[in-house]
Image (cartoon, grey):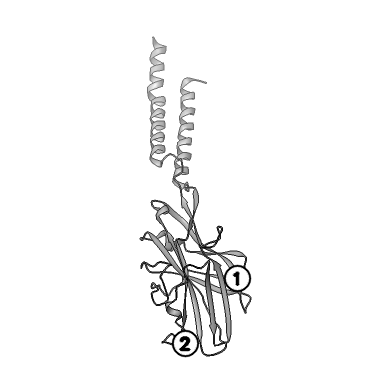
Amino acid sequence: MSIFTRSTALTRLLLLLALVGMLSSLGAKAPVESIVLQAVDDTYLVTDVSTTDDPQGLRDQNFGSLDFVRLWYKNKVTAEEQIVSIGLVKFDLAPLKGLQVESANLEMFALRADLTEPARLVEVTLVNPVPWAETDVTFNKRPPWGSTAASIVAVFGNGRWYSWDVSGTVASAKEPTVSYVLGLRTIDEKKEEQVVFVSREAAGRLGPRLVVTYATQPFTLSWYIWVGIAAGAAALAFLGGWWLPKRLRRARDL
């Protein structure tokens, strides 16, 4: 094989490798890693929606020191009262600063699930960015939240984790913290049901958590580097096809 033939074959190989590398860099997807954020505040709020004067004083009670978060209702079981409780949970997003969030799931561990149906839907809604603390928040001092649920999951038993996809609310968060309200989606007359989750005050690692996956930068050459390699290979092809044969002819004529 002549020098010119070897040069041409090498040039074709370089061009092929440059093309494959450039296409790979354009289509490469960054790998992901995960981080688990523990709740920094959690509690539940209670009210009797059947009355405006709050005869039992439920709306000013604080439950932030308890080791559970209770989603409960008691609807006209013994009288006309319609007692409802909802949960609140907050996370500090500082560890996510500068990260490209791919997904986020709110996870709660069910301690009890006393249901009159095989399952009940529990919805999670984003809370407006208004400061609140588990040590003094009550129903009367509750932060506002929207009317559209971020995620809905069926709860059907205790002793297990439940997960709500809240990716959009975490990825678009502008505040240093994010909060959610949890509640049973529907309640029935003449019934009493509850789902009790472990709170952050409980011993162990069964408190509310936010499991976040984020993209990491892959070790790949950028597309413009591969373009440079391709350009170099093209230049080599030009030299191999013009300059090298000419030099060989001169050497032969000497």
Q: Quadrant of residue 144?
A: bottom left
Image disc number at residue 170? none
Residue at image x 50%, y 79%? Answer: 84
* First reached walking from the N terminus: tag 2 or tag 1: 2
Q: Secondary structure at mark 2?
A: loop
Tell me the residue that label 2 is attached to: 50
Q: Quadrant of residue 230?
A: top left
The image position of residue 220, as x and y in percent, is 45, 40
* Amino acid type, callout 2: Ser
**Label 2 – label 1 distance at C-alpha:** 26 Å
Image disc number at residue 112? 1
Residue at image x 47%, y 20%? Answer: 3
- Crowd band around label 2 with a 10 angstrom C-alpha radius: few (<14), some (14–19), many (20+): some
Which image quadrant: the C terminus? top left
Q: Secondary structure at mark 1?
A: strand
The image position of residue 67, as x and y in percent, is 53, 66
* Amino acid type, callout 1: Arg
Q: Is residue 114 above or below residue 40?
A: below
Residue at image x 46%, y 25%? Answer: 7
Question: Which of the two residues, 154 or 222, is positioned nearer the viewer here?
Answer: 154
Residue at image x 50%, y 72%? Answer: 123
The image position of residue 30, as x and y in percent, is 47, 48
